[in-house]
Amino acid sequence: VTEKLSTSVVSEPLEQLFPRHLILSNRSACFLKLGHHEKALKDGSDAEILNPAYVKGVFRKGLALHAMGKYREAIDALAKAQKVEPKNKQIKQALQFAEVRLHQEMRKRMER
């Protein structure tokens, strides 16, 4: 019985309970909370590649870019998420915040 179980586990792929893009998006959220922004960006980007219509993957990609100080790229990702869900208040707020930070960064550069 043990041999059959081991062979079947190795040879047959496990049935996936949740779609891969959902898992990656949720892991991206976890990485964001832990401060692992590069890992969050990778998972958010991978989730977007697997399912571009799944807004949370794109949103979390935008949040990771923002956390990394890449405000222009964050604005692009968050604007894309907002096109999918224009009434989402979290996306709108994150987009506005990224725009403010970009303007602040640009002002600092001009003052130098």
Image (cartoon, helix red, strand yellow):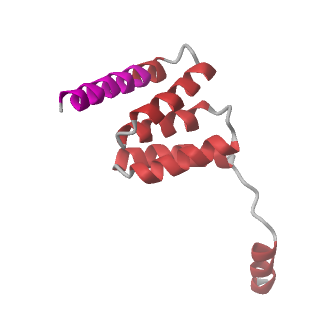
Residue 109 percent location from the top left of the image: 25, 32
Residue 14 percent location from the top left of the image: 75, 62
Q: Is residue 25 depicted above or below 56 in this figure?
A: below
Q: Residue at x 69, y 39 (%)?
A: 51
Q: Is residue 47 depicted above or below 111 in this figure?
A: below
Q: Residue at x 46, y 48 (%)?
A: 40
Name the residue nearer the viewer: 76 or 67. 76
Assign the magenta stretch its main secondary structure.
Answer: helix
Q: Residue at x 45, y 22 (%)?
A: 90
Q: Quadrant of the C terminus?
A: top left
Q: Residue extending furthest bottom? A: 3
Residue 53 percent location from the top left of the image: 68, 31
Total marks shown come to 0
Residue 19 shown in magenta: no
Judged left or right of residue 7, residue 91 is: left
Residue range of the region highlighted in magenta in the rendering:
94-111
Residue 104 shown in magenta: yes
Judged left or right of residue 64, residue 108 is: left
Q: Residue extending furthest top? A: 87
Q: Is residue 12 depicted above or below 107 in this figure?
A: below
Q: Quadrant of the N terminus?
A: bottom right
Name the residue nearer the viewer: 18 or 48. 48
Judged left or right of residue 40, residue 51 is: right
